[in-house]
Amino acid sequence: MYNTQREEPERVTGERAVAAASTKPIPPAPSALSTLLRFWRTVLAFVVRVDYTGTPGAISREPARVKTHLYGLAVVFRYWRSPHYWVAGTLGDEFRRQLRDVAIPGTGVRLSWVCISRFTVLIFLFVVYPIVALITALHSSWSGASPSTAHKFREVLLEPKGRLSLFTLNCILPTLHQKRTKASGYLQEDRFAFVENAERLGLPVAPCVKAGSFVVKGRGEEARGGAKFFRNAAHGGNWIIQERLENDAFVASLVPPDAPLSTFQVVTASRGGGLEHADVEGRGVVAIGCAFRAGRAGAQRDDPRSAILFDVDLRTGLMSKGKTSDHWHRLGIWGVLGAWRQPKLPAEGLVHHPDCGVRIAGRTVPDIKAIEELCIDAHRKMVPDIPIASWDVALTTRGRLLLQMNLSCDLAGCAVLDHDSYFELLDEYFALLDRPDVAERFHERRLEPM
């Protein structure tokens, strides 16, 4: 139990410290033109294949967040036509697929249009992106949300904190890592291979039906002749067949009665993909972020595009205010105009579930350490040679279960992600993957799956 008599003075002191810090003058940012020239020079240098460790000029003295962001943008262009490690096609095909129903917020413009070709990507990087950054900076400055246009322009262009930047890095890292190391862990992104391996290792995974094949028919007259046949993956087919799981009492108390299974996304990071000190206790595999996806009433699943995302502090289990990503999925002019005719949720700051009014922010997830350890254990046993993995964990009436693992993961829900650890890890991996002897170093240092 916490000592509440001591906790209050510490909290007040912390508030005073924040207030005092907010009164300190903010150091002047470089001019917008200086920032733009630095951006163009660095990205162009990486595009023409300057090594990551040879980061040009002043950027080499910037924090890892800046270097990894700019390098990631350039790598998208460099490896656009390279085969993707998992899906059929190239890295460009994967970006088009992932961004086909994502729009620049407020515009309705599909981001997949940017991905038509390497040429359109280049135009976006050097022209459109700086223009969008400038508009954002001007709006932020005029509204008082930022101390100056130059500060905000630098932040958006050189060290963005948004969802799209993290998504880009989390597509680039596994693609580049697999291409340079051929790590076997990437085979586990096959969902059936994941289930089989988890069962072999004794990890609690959502149970599968083992029967050979199934036929599904409607019961009404109108469904006559509408039977559908599914062959089980356990017998060489393409379908994983599972019974529907139900939320446990805690999760059910947070969402509407007709909400889908609502899950936790836990992000783990490993040094076992070729970095030093991977075998040091407590450093090899760690959890760096967690979010709860609260499903909406009547939805089929807790899709991040529709669910309410509440960040979870892995130290305490405390859930912070929630946010939505609906504004990223208003496609076309009718999608933008339709937002005015529908009840609109705020993009962030949600305290209650909008469909049932239950308060979620401020609630504590029971036994959060057990959820964290489950995901760390799964990463260590199944894919220790993979840098970043995202795990979907369900608290069900059958217990705590792993549902799936994602390697090109969207970190939309993890605002309390340990960003320092995340970008430092990316910094080390990008430096490793640009070395000519990366394959040898990987085989010397990698952690072996069990």
Image (cartoon, rainbow, N blue to C red):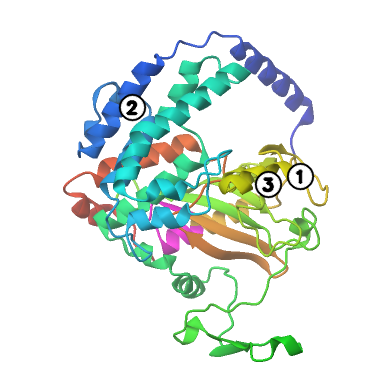
Quadrant of res 120: top left
**Residue under circle 3?**
338
The answer to whether residue 26 is magenta is no
Up/down of 240 relative to 448, above or below: below
Contact between marks 3 and 1 (CB within 8 A): the answer is no
In the rendered structure, which disc, 3 or 1, sits on the residue that comes first in sequence? Answer: 3
Which stretch did the figure color magenta? 377-389
Of badges 2 and 3, the one in the foreground is 3
Secondary structure state at the residue bearing disc 3: helix
Q: Nearer the viewer, residue 339 or 413?
A: 339
**Which residue is denoted by mark 1 in the rendering?**
343
Q: Which residue carries the number 2 mark?
A: 39
Front residue of this view, candidates 145 and 55: 145
Residue 384 on the magenta segment: yes
- Tag 3: Cα neighbours inside 10 Å, few (<14), some, or many (≥20)? few
Q: Amino acid at mark 2?
A: Phe
Mark 3: which amino acid? Gly
Give the tally of numbered discs.
Answer: 3
